[in-house]
Image (spheres, rainbow, N blue to C red):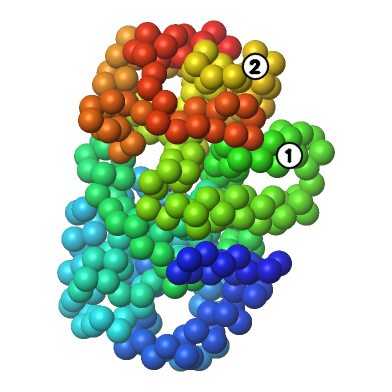
């Protein structure tokens, strides 16, 4: 699989990752290397990854606890201090070996520690492979508000090795699948149709589907790295999805929702809004809802919570001058950004989802 080149980074696939990594490590003389892992990737991914590094380097392992609730500034603070205590200077290298939490948080640490050191993303979850590790968005949550603090700055390289997926729990695979569906919905009808027909998808197809997803994301980010225009498409499903994710994150009495599971709900609701405001047809809406619900069982959102979830929308980063702006679909495979949505339609979208 040919590497995918972006503005300041390059994405390698499978075994090519390691020749690229070893060549890079040899070429750039880093004073120290830190590999950031979480408790799961420490156990499941680190031994394999270490076995691929050919020469001896001064490597420190830093482990964080797994889970979105640890993607916060307190965790960063601990790591910044650890790096300082370990004597990391500006020639240090950070390798983020994990899911989107590790790549988002590790990228943010690398971009801010001593005003920025080099970093490499090695995504180990499907979601991080197809989305989080590509495109240079880094950051952490602030309380229950998602990705409120962060910077955009690309990694030196991204190493996508699908071997890591062997130990990924099935619900996490589904969570990543949500972002792949999103890529089809916003940009590529043919890709969406391939993904939709899950019965025809073989495991051998997965590598190609991941590759195609990275191409879609990379093409968008390449054209608009700082999200002035088309990068906003990638937020489809995320306006309501993030609000739902934040709400469930801070209500431990309710079931836990993974990022992709919340985005799946968000995509159905925003497809509904698209059918009311733009040209998504009833058939397309039905197809989107059916395909998503075939992978993501329905979540019973209590109608008394609709209001509280909607209030979280005011913190959405796409908002401008107090307007909540959505990305909507014009059809399957094409999107439009900066769409204003009346409050009552948001409420109707909750009702539509609950009626399915
Ligand atoms: P995650 O990092 O929490 O990983 C999910 C779980 O899988 C964790 O428990 C992790 O320890 C475990 N895991 C990861 N790889 C494993 C492996 N190979 N074997 C066994 N267990 C493994 O979450 P995620 O779903 O990967 O990513 C979600 C995060 O990504 C969210 O914080 C979201 O905001 C962020 N995100 C960022 C971008 C971006 O552009 N920066 C895009 C999409 C999502
Ligand atoms: Zn996402």
**Picture coordinates of residue 277 (x, y %)?**
50, 16
Instruction: Give the residue drawn at x 66%, y 52%.
Output: 212
Residue 262 located left or right of residue 106: right
Residue 58 pos. (x, y %):
37, 87
* Residue underneath mark 1: 190
User: Where, by quadrant of the figure, is residue 173 drawn?
Assistant: top right
Residue 272 is situated, as x and y percent measured from the top left of the image, at 53, 17
Which circle marks residue 281 in the picture? 2
21 to 148, vertically: above or below: below
Viewer-nearest residue: 204 or 40 = 204
Secondary structure at numbered mark 2: loop
Residue 243 found in image quarter:
top left
Q: Is residue 233 left or right of residue 240?
A: right
Task: State the residue at coordinates (39%, 91%).
Answer: 29
Task: Compute the Cα span from label 2 to label 1.
Answer: 17 Å
Q: How would you rate the neighbour count of disc 1 (Cα within 10 Å): few for under 14, some for 14-19, many for 20 or more? A: few
Q: Is residue 16 visible?
A: yes
Q: Secondary structure at mark 1?
A: helix
Q: Quick check: is the Cβ at mark 1 less than 8 Å away from ligand 2? A: no
Q: Residue at x 71, y 67 (%)?
A: 1
Mark 2 or 1 closer to N-term?
1
Q: Residue at x 57, y 26 (%)?
A: 330
């Amino acid at each position: 699989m040919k590497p995918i080149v972006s503005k300041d980074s390059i994405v390698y696939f499978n075994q090519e990752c390691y020749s690229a990594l070893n060549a890079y490590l040899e070429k750039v003389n880093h004073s120290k290397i830190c590999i950031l892992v979480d408790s799961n990737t420490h156990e499941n991914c680190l031994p394999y990854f270490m076995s691929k590094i050919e020469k001896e380097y001064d490597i420190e392992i830093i482990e964080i606890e797994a889970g979105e609730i640890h993607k916060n500034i307190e965790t960063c603070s601990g790591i910044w201090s650890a790096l300082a205590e370990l004597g990391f200077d500006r020639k240090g290298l950070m390798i983020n070996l994990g899911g989107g939490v590790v790549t988002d948080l590790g990228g943010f640490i690398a971009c801010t520690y001593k005003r920025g050191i080099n970093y490499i993303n090695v995504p180990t979850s499907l979601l991080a492979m197809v989305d989080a590790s590509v495109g240079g968005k880094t950051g952490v949550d602030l309380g229950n508000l998602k990705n409120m603090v962060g910077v955009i700055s690309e990694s030196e390289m991204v190493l996508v090795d699908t071997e890591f997926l062997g130990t990924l729990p099935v619900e996490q695979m589904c969570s990543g699948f949500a972002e792949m569906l999103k890529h089809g919905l916003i940009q590529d009808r043919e890709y969406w149709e391939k993904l939709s027909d899950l019965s025809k998808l073989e495991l051998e197809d997965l590598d190609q589907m991941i590759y195609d997803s990275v191409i879609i994301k990379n093409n968008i980010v390449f054209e608009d790295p700082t999200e002035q225009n088309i990068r906003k498409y990638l937020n489809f499903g995320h306006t309501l999805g993030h609000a739902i994710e934040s709400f469930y994150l801070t209500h431990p009495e309710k079931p836990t929702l993974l990022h992709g599971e919340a985005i799946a709900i968000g995509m159905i609701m925003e497809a509904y809004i698209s059918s009311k405001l733009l040209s998504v047809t009833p058939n397309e809406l039905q197809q989107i809802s059916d395909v998503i619900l075939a992978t993501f069982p329905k979540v019973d959102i209590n109608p008394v919570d609709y209001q509280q979830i909607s209030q979280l929308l005011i913190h959405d980063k796409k908002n401008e001058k107090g307007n909540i702006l959505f990305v909507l679909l014009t059809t399957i495979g094409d999107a439009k950004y900066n769409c204003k949505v009346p409050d009552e339609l948001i409420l109707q979208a909750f009702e539509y989802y609950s009626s399915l």
